[in-house]
């Protein structure tokens, strides 16, 4: 499980990183809004621990932008703002939980487990876009109601795009999802699979996969 911690205080950030890592979470710790945005553009996370008082902006504004763009990952706000109205505002803007400072590590870990567990139980199993229907349970793909025969790699690649429709996905992120490791994206293997997927799903005059030069691909 991957956790993104956004906390500008060095002592607390290291404390959270160590505590979560000791519970077998893979933790990325950043200290400001800009680095948080970069981290989310490069990888996906199972949960996010978000401080509000950041040096380059307010965590609530960051959360508002995430939700407006369709970002659905669970967010736990961790903040010294412990008034009732502060908690209500954070939850109304899309936070899944709110833990005021000071806090116990045991409670934070319990809340993170709850968020991850809740997220896994409501995971979407059917994705539809542009006439394509992908069913995770039956492991099938249809295009305008007709079955499409995909290899396991092609299916995994399409799944990544269907789950991130509209987002520009870096080549490194796509490769990590498909090959379960940091793949050498300088090779043309990803491009080969993209070409195969396009051949099976795109029709003349209808582009589905946009190449973003120097970055990666976008499912439009």
Image (cartoon, rainbow, N blue to C red):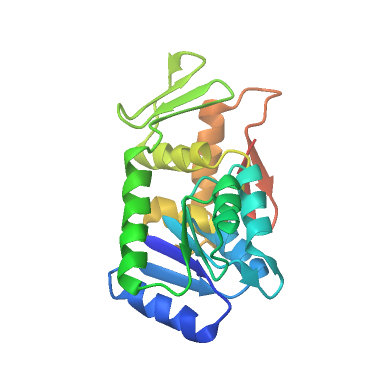
Q: Is residue 176 above or below residue 159?
A: below
**Where does residue 84 sit, x and y in percent of width and height?**
55, 56
Residue 181 picture location, percent across and down: 39, 62
Q: Nearer the viewer, residue 21 or 192?
A: 21
Q: Residue furthest bottom?
A: 11
Q: Indicate left or right for 24 with 180 as reference.
A: left
* Residue 216 in sight from this viewpoint: yes
Tell me the quarter of the picture where residue 81 sits: bottom right
Tell me if 70 is positioned left or right of 154 in this view: right
Q: Of 119 and 130, which appears nearest the observer?
A: 119
Residue occupying the point 61% across, 54% down: 63
| Quadrant (top left, top right, bottom left, bottom right) of the N terminus | bottom left
Direction top: furthest residue: 145
Q: Would you say residue 170 is visible in this rendering? A: no
Residue at x 61%, y 51% (from the top left corner)? 89
Q: Indicate the position of residue 219 as horizontal and vertical percent values.
A: 60, 38
Rendered-image quadrant of the C terminus = top right
Location of residue 108 in the rendering, given as x and y in whole percent from the top left corner: 37, 66
Q: Is residue 206 above or below residue 182?
A: above
Task: Looking at this view, name the residue that lies furthest to the left.
Answer: 23
130 relative to 139 in the view: left or right: right
The residue that appears at 59% across and 42% down in the rendered structure is 70
Q: Residue 171 versus residue 149: which sits nearer the camera?
A: 171
């Amino acid at each position: 499980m991957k956790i993104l911690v956004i906390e500008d205080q060095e002592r607390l950030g290291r404390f959270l990183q160590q505590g979560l890592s000791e519970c077998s979470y893979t933790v990325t710790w950043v200290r400001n809004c800009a680095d948080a945005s970069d981290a989310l553009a490069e990888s996906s996370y199972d949960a996010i621990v978000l401080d509000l008082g950041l040096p380059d902006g307010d965590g609530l504004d960051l959360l508002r932008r995430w939700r407006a763009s369709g970002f659905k990952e669970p967010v736990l706000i961790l903040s010294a703002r412990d008034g009732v109205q502060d908690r209500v505002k954070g939850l109304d803007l899309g936070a899944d939980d709110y833990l005021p400072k000071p806090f116990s590590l045991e409670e934070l870990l319990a809340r993170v487990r709850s968020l991850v567990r809740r997220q896994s139980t409501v995971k979407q199993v059917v994705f539809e876009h542009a006439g394509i229907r992908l069913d995770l349970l039956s492991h099938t793909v249809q295009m305008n109601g007709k079955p499409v025969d995909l290899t396991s790699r092609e299916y995994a690649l399409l799944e990544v795009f269907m789950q991130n429709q509209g987002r520009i996905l870096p080549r490194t992120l796509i490769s990590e999802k498909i090959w379960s490791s940091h793949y050498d994206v300088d090779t043309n293997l990803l491009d080969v699979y993209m070409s195969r997927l396009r051949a099976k799903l795109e029709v003349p005059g209808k582009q589905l996969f946009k190449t973003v030069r120097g970055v990666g691909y976008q499912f439009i």
